[in-house]
Amino acid sequence: MATTGQEEFTLDTAAELAAKEGGSQIQGKSPWVLAGRRMRRNYVSLAFLGIFLLIVISCLLAPLYVSQVSHIPQNDVRTGATVVEHGKTVNVISQGGTKIVNGVPQIVFGGVPIGAQWGAAGGKYVLGADELGRDVGTRLLYGGRNSLFIGVTSAAICTTLSVVLALLAGYFGGIVDWIISRFFDLVWAFPVVLLGIALGTALSVNGFHHGPINVSSGSLWIPIGVISFVFIPYIGRPLRGQVLALRNREFIEAATAQGAGPVRIMFSELLPNVASSVLVLFTLIVANSILTEVGLSFLGAGVQLPNPSWGTMIQEGSKLLSTAPQISLFPGIAIALTVLSLNVFGDGLRDALDPRAKIRIEHG
């Protein structure tokens, strides 16, 4: 730790921060304030956070893109439509025929969608069309809305359930800990994708109808529920270990001696001490949830057509990779940027909240 001239501890474990600002300026500051200062110096993580926010804002502005640029709704099929490209009328989906190449007639097979129309077609098909004549740019943005909504919502639900289960298991121990731990082990034993496919396929056929819960087969809440469930042990297990380590600490004994009940101890004493881990795990699980949704949708167990998502777009474009690669290319790029930005930001957040982890890596 950095010290002042009077050899007083500054509460900051990052030597770089103390060297730059001096111990007197950070002494007595909240750990969250110090984490914020460390995070502001991580320009790479902040840059990738900006990329993620740009993707989110772009997807949220999908209705504006439709009304001002493409003028083509997300599910509007236009197989027989035409656009004007450089003064010529071009079919959105090629009609086939023949063309002369070096004086030799060659057959041109129909059914191939047009590619990206940069500056042509009056803003329509800026990223090209798919096999049904739908605008790829429009579906990319609306698909991003669905993929991001599923990823963030499922991660939030998963994190909430995992925190509650970890607190219960770690605080009470005994039979409660045994039951919750066996539940974690049971879900952990199945590969995420296989379990997600099994649950998603079963629920996508008839939906989920039980008591007051009535979810139709095409609802986005089905992949949200499936992804939330399969990732519970990936957050709950490490948090349970941290709660067990904190359970017998002096401040817990002091709170118990003052008459604090289990609920107060769990959420007022234990939860704040694992909040940094929860925050880091949440950012990383969002990225994993988006990847899982893409995989499930690609295999038909996630978002159901005609609703777009990045996974369904890649699945639709996989049949036309040689003739219309843009259908799969653009959602693939969006997925890569989104997941990369979340992972880099999550790593930076972990370093800011727990600088000692960085020190162990450097000097271990």
Image (cartoon, rainbow, N blue to C red):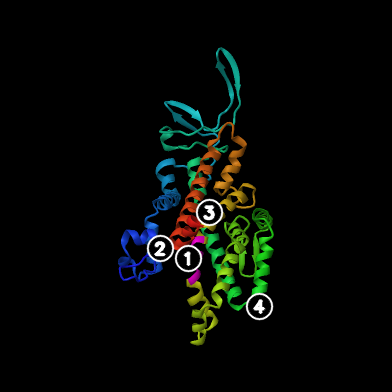
> In the image, is residue 119 above or below residue 357?
above
Q: What whole-number distance in Å separates the C-alpha atoms at marks 1 and 4?
A: 27 Å
The x, y position of residue 10, in whole percent, is 36, 69
Q: Are marks 1 and 4 in contact (CB under 8 Å)?
A: no
The x, y position of residue 238, in whole percent, is 58, 65
Q: What residue is pinned by disc 4?
A: 174
Inspect this view and state whether residue 73 appears.
no
Q: What residue is pinned by disc 1?
A: 276
Mark 3 or mark 1, earlier in chain: 1
Residue 35 is tagged as 2
- SS state under label 4: helix
Q: What whole-number distance in Å separates the C-alpha atoms at marks 3 and 1?
A: 18 Å
Asked if residue 177 lies left or right of residue 43, the reply is right
User: What type is the residue that disc 4 sits on?
Assistant: Gly
Mark 4 or mark 2, earlier in chain: 2
Q: In the figure, residue 133 lies in which quadrant?
A: top right
> In the image, is residue 315 above or below residue 280?
above
Observer-nearest of 87 and 137: 137
Report the magenta residues as a range: 273-280
Q: What residue is pinned by disc 3?
A: 287
Between disc 3 and disc 4, the foreground one is: 4
User: What type is the residue that disc 3 sits on?
Assistant: Ala
User: What type is the residue that disc 1 sits on?
Assistant: Ser
